């Protein structure tokens, strides 16, 4: 995402909790900050990969300061945004914090209140798409926040994604929508794991079954992506690690608890993920919570 | 399906357990039989809507007699195929029974054995697609049976569907594949029901959430079809009634039991369907096992 | 059970599908029959271990012929009762078939009809208790059937069990009650498996946790019996093999389907049992569907 | 519990967040404090109903100051123990905090650290038993903490309960054991709800089914207590309200997440409780998450 911003001509100062991860961006022209507050100092800095940053494009609608965060979980966002040298205490009034991380509805609500109290804007803008989509500017952006704040973010969103869906005024709507999406992806993984196991064990090779599915009723790319991983039992290297996926399912369950909605498939996936973690699959792709498929056989029992 | 056969020039004798349902087909040129045996008598008869029939196309590969059955459940197929005046006892040696119904793996295995013992061919050819797709010849056909038997059915399949997937020699492979598909459709319904409930109750109108889903990661038409039904709470008239859907989930579970594969989402759906039946939803669409969505509100609790 | 009858002075002819299993009973005074029909021939024979038999006590209320069956599943009962040389065709009018097996509600209904058509009595009398309880005459008997038929079975029940619960006129009521009991036992096993795993992994040794449970709120012996098996991971030799337990859970689910009641814990157990069967646990105790407990550690992660 | 302490001759100062709830205890001889710090001021105060207190028995082993808390959830305990005028800042070094509330393992761990840092003792001592058992001194106490600290609490535990189970040095062991117990009670409720529904709908009245269960294999009082509530559909007045039960199930799931143990029945109950809350059952007994039983009928479908 930071690469896309640099490529679009934005002046960018980046901060990453693991400084070495910023090396490539430095080579591509980004200034590198040692802490969030530094990343948003001045008025011409901009952007971030994992961490905080302030964008201040040379021209266009995002001439105003915008800090973008994309971090792995609530704890990281809390530290970068609400910590001692964090965004809330560092950003000038009128600046905007665009939070792209998949975080809890509860934390998003706290961020909205903290930024509002500091006279800053806050936009929740989680994204859909694997790393390749981010590199190609093909993300989908789910955005929510005050209309005029969103308007200032328009050029930023254009640089990052292929389409932006505006959920409304309340930032938590975007976080909720993102959790719905991740829950549905997990549902696809679980259902494919079950269905392909039935196929394989019955004598239909998983790749053949998957071809039938994806070329008929289940043509969405998500079925092909995860179906191939599951059929091949190929969970390394992880595109998205299991503990992060588990975090997202817990966030979906927590969001649903808050509005008294049961999510039985999420509970099922939650339990399967825990069993997978107990088996030591912390570094595998999150789709590995689906157990290894039984080997295909033409002589099912 | 019978309409498609008539339109393609096939001579067709049809039999339906509810004779009045054959009226439209009679008007379209089909002969109407009073029982299965009559439908397959002679060598020039052909086809059926719901029931049994023998096709004997004027020329081409399906010059040999083919009886097609498309019935609602195991009991009906058992009666029409294995009953006193049924296909096994009526068809001449060398004729082929093409069974398009979604039936149990166990019954398909029995049919294969009975037809083989009678010197007849047997092909399992369940289809994917709602009634509109059938009328338009846009079904997908999942076919399995002996290669030369399948070859004789080629023109028939071309008249009925847009594409045929051949699963292999053993007819039960096609039945299993069909059950995997229906299981996955049920999984989509359940997951959409849960996800849209979370969205609605959190203040995101279901249609908006559905638009985001179907225009990003979940672009398969099945998400739009069932998502719209669920978002609208529109379960009448039923495209496919709940008791039939329940039957299919039970068949999937039974097929999985036979090969010792657990299907937790199927169990979940099974239980939700039972609760829906207990609420009296026998005449609603099968997607109605998803409970009515809570009403959207901008002030979630 | 046959031993108890012999000990109570009943004249007994026994039949077992595996004849060698009748050896001990022969030594104890039972006549041994080669087929069900033979076991119930004459008017003074009586009883059975696994198989069919006719009791005709020297005096008392069960002077009339009674055949008792205790078999492993529906198929066995169907063969022994409804087969060619089975009880329905062999018993004289007025005789009674007491079916103690845990069978499906559907088969019990068929048996009731078949015996009624033959002028015979039919009582469903499944029992509660492990083999030790049977040997000690400490079974609980769940009985249902016509009142006068039950009355004739009174002395038989007294010889076999410590208490008889009469469910009503319709024999299937007793079968249903038995399935409810077995379902509840399976629920205890599953919940203990989960709870003890949480304890162990948190640093509380399973035996200590079990002691707390069974000496406070969960004082029923069933908790101690299965808790000890689970805590020790001791699933061989099997008191009741996993495939038989799986059969019972399927019967409970089927009975519940017929009256449109969902049983979510039964579905859960069903799926865990299938996974255990897929791991090859066919000869282990049915409680082995609970996975092996994680090893206790004072340093939980 | 405070009444028991007063009756045993302990000098008691009580604090309740809702002061009027302390009126009965004042009448029974307790001093009433306006805030936690006041309750533990001096060296002769003692005890509490809902809130904080310091016991300093006239003689015997608990001559040293002991503050007992019994509060409804983590937030209340956090406020009373860790807040501005809370126990950690108010208790003298060497005093002991006995926490009887059912709280999270995580908070118990924080309390242990905070009290240790202040030179105070900390014992987790959650209890088993409904209010009647507490009034009669018949509670079971699950206690964990440093051995010498526990020894000083001995007389206190004797006054409160019929038996104390010592889990070990680490206070969180007692909290975990308590969560295991509450999880198992919830499992009993869910399984009884399912089993009695099957019975009722099949024509066996729930009270009759319950009698069979509780007089055979399921003789623990917990089956009778909750079975009667469920059979009668009698969920008001609540002995323990649904939101509190939901809290406990969430705590059990959280404790299990921390040690990577899936609890599928807890997930099931979690979802059923959420559905019950969505139906507005906040003031009903926690066993009301079991849906109302279908009405018994001798003519099941």
Image (spheres, coloured by chain):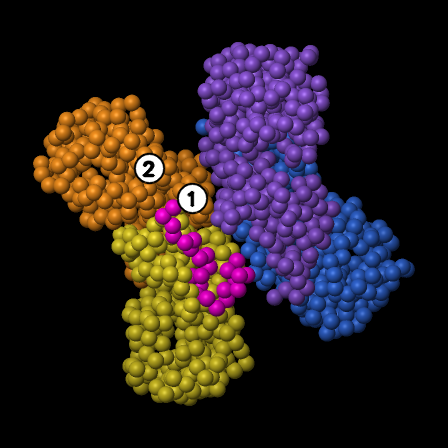
Chain colours: A blue, B purple, C orange, D yellow
Q: The disc numbered 1 marks a residue on which chain?
A: D
Which of these two is toward me, D55 or C248? Answer: C248
Q: Is residue C185 visible?
A: no
Helix, strand or loop status at disc 1: loop
Question: How far across and how far down the image is residue D94, in percent?
Answer: 41, 79
Left or right, D180 with respect to C85, comes to right
Q: Is residue D280 visible?
A: yes
* Residue span colored magenta: D275-299
To which residue does mark 2 refer? C108
Is residue D296 highlighted in magenta? yes
Residue in view at x 57 percent, y 18 percent: B39
Which residue appears at 48% of the width and 25% of the height?
B79
Is D119 located above or below residue B22 in the figure?
below
- Residue D32, compared with residue A169, is above or below; it is below
According to the image, label 1 marks what residue? D301
Q: In whole angstroms, how far apart are the C-alphas of marks 1 and 2?
A: 16 Å
Residue B183 x, y percent position in the rendering = 56, 38
Q: Nearer the viewer, residue C240 or C112?
A: C112
Q: Secondary structure at mark 2?
A: helix
To the question of a shared chain for discs 1 and 2, the answer is no
In the image, which is nearer the foreground, mark 1 or mark 2? 1
Q: Position of residue C82 (x, y in %)?
A: 30, 28
Disc 2 crowd, CA 10 A, few/some/many (<14, 14-19, 20+): many
Residue nearest the observer in this picture, A11 or D21: D21
Q: Is residue A29 shown in magenta?
A: no
Q: Position of residue A268 (x, y in %)?
A: 53, 49
Locate the N terminus of chain C by quadrant. Answer: top left
Mark 1 crowd level (few <14, some 14–19, many ≥20, 10 Å Cα): few
- Chain name for mark 2: C
């Amino acid at each position: 995402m930071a690469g896309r911003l640099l490529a679009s001509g934005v002046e960018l100062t980046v901060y990453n909790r693991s400084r070495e991860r910023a090396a490539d961006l430095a080579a591509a022209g980004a200034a590198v900050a040692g802490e969030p507050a530094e990343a948003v100092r001045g008025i011409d800095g901009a952007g971030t990969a994992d961490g905080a940053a302030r964008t201040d494009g040379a021209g266009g609608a995002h001439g105003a300061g915008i800090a973008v965060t994309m971090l792995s979980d609530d704890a990281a966002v809390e530290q970068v945004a609400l910590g001692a040298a964090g965004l809330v205490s560092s950003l000038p009034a009128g600046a905007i914090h665009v939070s792209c991380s998949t975080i809890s509805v509860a934390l998003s609500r706290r961020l909205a209140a903290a930024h509002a109290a500091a006279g800053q804007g806050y936009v929740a803008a989680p994204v859909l798409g694997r790393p390749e989509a981010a590199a190609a500017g093909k993300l989908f952006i789910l955005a929510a926040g005050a209309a005029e704040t969103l308007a200032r973010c328009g050029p930023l969103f254009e640089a990052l994604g292929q389409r932006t869906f505006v959920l409304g005024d309340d930032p938590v709507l975007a976080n909720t929508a993102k959790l719905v999406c991740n829950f549905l992806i997990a549902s696809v993984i679980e259902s494919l794991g079950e269905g392909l196991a039935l196929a394989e064990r019955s004598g239909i090779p998983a790749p053949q079954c998957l071809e039938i599915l994806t070329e008929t009723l289940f043509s969405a790319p998500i079925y092909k992506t995860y179906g191939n991983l599951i059929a091949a039992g190929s969970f390394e290297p992880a595109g998205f690690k299991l503990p992060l996926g588990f975090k997202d399912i817990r966030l979906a369950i927590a969001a649903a608890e808050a509005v008294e909605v049961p999510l039985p498939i999420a509970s099922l996936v939650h339990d399967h993920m825990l069993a997978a973690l107990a088996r030591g699959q912390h570094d595998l792709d999150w789709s590995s919570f689906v157990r290894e498929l039984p080997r295909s056989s033409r002589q099912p029992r």
